[in-house]
Image (cartoon, rainbow, N blue to C red):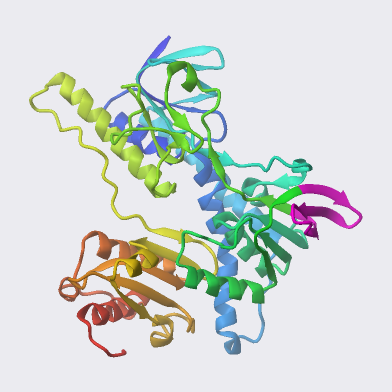
């Protein structure tokens, strides 16, 4: 039986960051992968989604600068899909080459934990001093009549031709981000939500602005509806909800959530605790078995299940294992095994425009009596933001005039929230920002000037 210092079950961001760090410390490491090397984000999630959206972001820019252009370009979905395969498909191979060069073993197959120091893959046992479970999540599938007609996000991002009518079930990230793309292609788009809210985690006034824009782009929203049947009809697929509501469509994406991959991997046999939300761990990301960690989206955790948090956890686990090994070699000089401490975490909905936020939510800040300020930077910085006059930001200021939370509605919201993350995490004041010089002209420099004005409490416009 081949022995390793660390075996990772899974090969996505929750695993490979730690694997690379540990091999650099001359530890023997293996990644077990039953599907595609490098996991969901690289192959079927964030990366291809971001790529597929890029031409539609250009279209939105053109629409805002409409009078300047004499002709509006069309997007070829077929050409875009070919470009996606050209760019995305090689990434797994490039990472595989990197892992091989660094000495990380790749074991193909389904990994099952046999005991606390053994993982079995297709009948072959592998030994390990430490095991890290990083199996992520998969798409939830509605258990309804006709579920065989439903597709998931992975299917959507591999469509060879785009349907004329498309329906998304769910009101979260996947539905709204994909509906944004579909509307730009001129499809007849429907979004069915089982509640009365869309993108619940985001600042709702900005969500309402986004919904209004999408409705103007031929997206129809249906609230408080639960789909219970899909069948073939005379003109495509027929969808029926419990209320009696029906809808004819050509393609249905089930975006009703994601569930952790915890089944049939030996957790029950070993007594590793988990719930329907994922594996339970302590503050050092250890399961109730003292040499088995878990990382990434498979965790039962309250913080957002995002690629950056998975990478952060992976790096943390690498440091924990290094520290434990150092303690065994020299207890007096070992690093302290400190609990994981998450910084503020930004979240982004990659719609058009994008929504983003970081720190204390604006709704919670209002309840706590924080000073809430709205900055209409799209109007004030019109040339920097390509005539996006409805772009804006709302911030929550504490008693020391530091930003405790922010929400943004803008095409540049993803990049801008990274700046806000730095300001919130480091508790920077206007004085701190005034001690720095930023590139000008740029989108961010104008925002920073407007922020300083609000943080200083000056009532003026730039």
Residue furthest left in the image = 332
Q: Residue at x 76, y 41 (%)?
A: 148
- Image coordinates of residue 229 in percent, x first then y, are 78, 47
- Image coordinates of residue 286 in percent, x first then y, are 33, 29
* Picture quarter with the N terminus: top left
Image: 10 above or below 148 = above
Confirm whether residue 287 shows in the render: yes
210 vs 455, left or right, is right
Which span of residues is magenta-colored?
Answer: 229-251
The majority secondary structure of the magenta stretch comes to strand
Q: Residue at x 20, y 36 (%)?
A: 338
Q: In the rendered structure, does residue 240 fall within the stretch colored magenta?
A: yes
- Residue 20 quadrant: top left
Question: 319 or 282: which is nearer to us?
Answer: 282
- Image coordinates of residue 219 in percent, x first then y, are 68, 69
Q: In the rendered structure, does residue 284 fall within the stretch colored magenta?
A: no
Question: 272 or 228: which is nearer to us?
Answer: 228
Question: 9 or 301: which is nearer to us?
Answer: 301
Confirm whether residue 414 shows in the render: no
């Amino acid at each position: 039986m081949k022995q390793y210092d660390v075996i990772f079950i899974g090969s996505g961001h929750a695993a490979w960051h730690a694997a690379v760090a540990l091999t650099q410390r001359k530890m023997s490491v293996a990644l077990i992968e039953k599907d595609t090397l490098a996991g969901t984000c690289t192959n079927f999630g964030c990366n291809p989604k971001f790529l597929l959206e890029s031409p539609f972001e250009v279209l939105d820019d053109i629409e805002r600068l409409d009078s300047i252009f004499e002709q509006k370009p069309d997007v070829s979905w077929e050409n875009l899909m070919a470009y996606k395969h050209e760019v995305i498909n090689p990434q797994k191979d490039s990472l595989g080459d990197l892992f091989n060069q660094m000495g990380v073993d790749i074991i193909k197959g389904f990994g099952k934990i046999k005991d606390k120091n053994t993982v079995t893959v297709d009948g072959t046992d592998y030994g390990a001093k430490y095991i890290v479970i990083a199996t992520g999540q998969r798409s939830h599938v509605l258990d309804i009549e006709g579920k065989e007609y439903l597709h998931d996000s992975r299917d959507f991002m591999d469509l060879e031709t785009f349907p004329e009518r498309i329906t998304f079930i769910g009101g979260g990230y996947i539905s709204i981000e994909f509906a944004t793309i579909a509307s730009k292609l001129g499809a007849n788009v429907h979004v069915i939500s089982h509640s009365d809210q869309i993108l619940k985690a985001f600042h709702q006034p900005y969500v309402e602005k986004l919904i209004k824009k999408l409705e103007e782009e031929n997206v129809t929203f249906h609230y408080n509806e639960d789909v219970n049947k899909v069948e073939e009809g005379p003109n495509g697929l027929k969808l029926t909800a419990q209320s009696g509501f029906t809808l004819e469509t050509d393609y249905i994406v089930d975006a009703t959530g994601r569930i952790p991959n915890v089944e049939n991997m030996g957790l029950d046999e070993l007594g590793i605790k988990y719930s329907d939300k994922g594996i339970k761990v302590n503050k050092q990301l250890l399961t109730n078995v003292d040499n088995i960690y878990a990382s990434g989206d498979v965790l039962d955790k309250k913080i957002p299940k995002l690629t950056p948090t998975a990478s952060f956890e992976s790096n943390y686990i690498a440091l924990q294992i290094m520290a434990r090994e150092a303690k065994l070699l020299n207890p007096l000089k070992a690093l302290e095994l400190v609990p994981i401490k998450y910084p503020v975490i930004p979240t982004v909905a990659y719609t058009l425009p994008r929504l983003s936020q970081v720190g204390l939510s604006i709704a919670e800040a209002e309840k706590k009596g924080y000073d809430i300020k709205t900055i209409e930077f799209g109007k004030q910085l019109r040339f920097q933001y390509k005539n996006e006059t409805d772009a804006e930001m709302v911030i929550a200021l504490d008693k020391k005039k530091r930003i405790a939370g922010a929400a943004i509605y803008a095409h540049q919201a993803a990049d801008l929230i990274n700046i806000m993350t730095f300001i919130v995490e480091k508790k920077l004041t206007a004085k701190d920002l005034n001690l720095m010089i930023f590139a000008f002209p740029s989108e961010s420099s104008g925002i920073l000037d407007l922020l300083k004005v609000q943080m200083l409490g000056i009532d003026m416009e730039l």
